[in-house]
Amino acid sequence: KVRRQQEGLEESTRELALLQAMCMDVEEQKQEAQDRAELLQMQLDIILEKQTGTAAVAHDPRAAPGGAETAGGTGPAPGQSTELQALHSRLEKAEAEASKVATQLQEAQRAHAREVALLHKAMRTLESSNRQGAAQSSARELQELLEQNRDLQASLNRLKQQRQAM
């Protein structure tokens, strides 16, 4: 039973290491997506500055002149260049990808937390089982010693009786 629990604990440890690696991988993907979004935003700012003579406010394309938010949504105004529209589209895609990666990271972190909790529970169960096993082993040893003591006592009584009979 203890061996099965130890094997389960080892398996949980391997799964935990795998989840940690996945979390790190998702973190890297998230950072890459954010970096791409920032690069696209800088490119968008440069094009806006060239076309309008002013930089985008707070790196928000919806706040930039000519790209103001309208009732129909966000994005470049109808008269802007196709290059600007393409950059804006790439930026939106990068932001969507960053959001998706962030969601994956959160899911991986939750799975990691569940695995850690299960690992701790398995460790506590194993420790408890080991203590119970040790207590049972000690009880068996004590029982054996008591039986040996009774046998020795009986032998001693027989020897005393034989001695008195002589």
Image: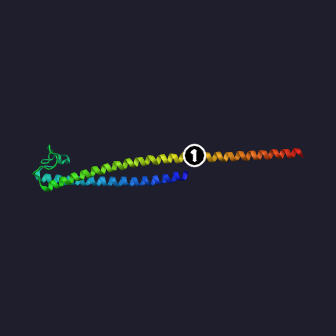
Name, please, the residue furthest toward the left.
Answer: 79
Residue 117 is situated, as x and y percent measured from the top left of the image, at: 44, 46
Q: Residue at x 34, y 48 (%)?
A: 106
- Residue lying at the far right in this picture: please name it: 166
In the image, taking residue 7 as reference, residue 144 lies left or right, namely right
Residue that carries the numbered disc 1 in the rendered image: 131
- Nearest the viewer among 100 and 60 is 100
**Amino acid identity at mark 1:** Arg
User: Which quadrant of the view contains residue 139?
Assistant: top right
Residue drawn at the location 59% of the way across and 47% of the way down: 133
60 horizontally vs 134: left or right: left
Looking at the picture, how far across and down is residue 44, in whole percent? Answer: 17, 53
Front residue of 146/40: it is 146
Query: In which quarter of the view is residue 73 placed?
Result: top left
Circle 1 sits in a helix, a strand or a loop, which is it?
helix
Q: Nearer the viewer, residue 72 or 28?
A: 72
In the picture provided, is 157 more to the left or to the right than 80?
A: right
**Picture residue at 73% right of the left edge, 47% below the top:** 148
Residue sitting nearer the eye, 104 or 62: 104
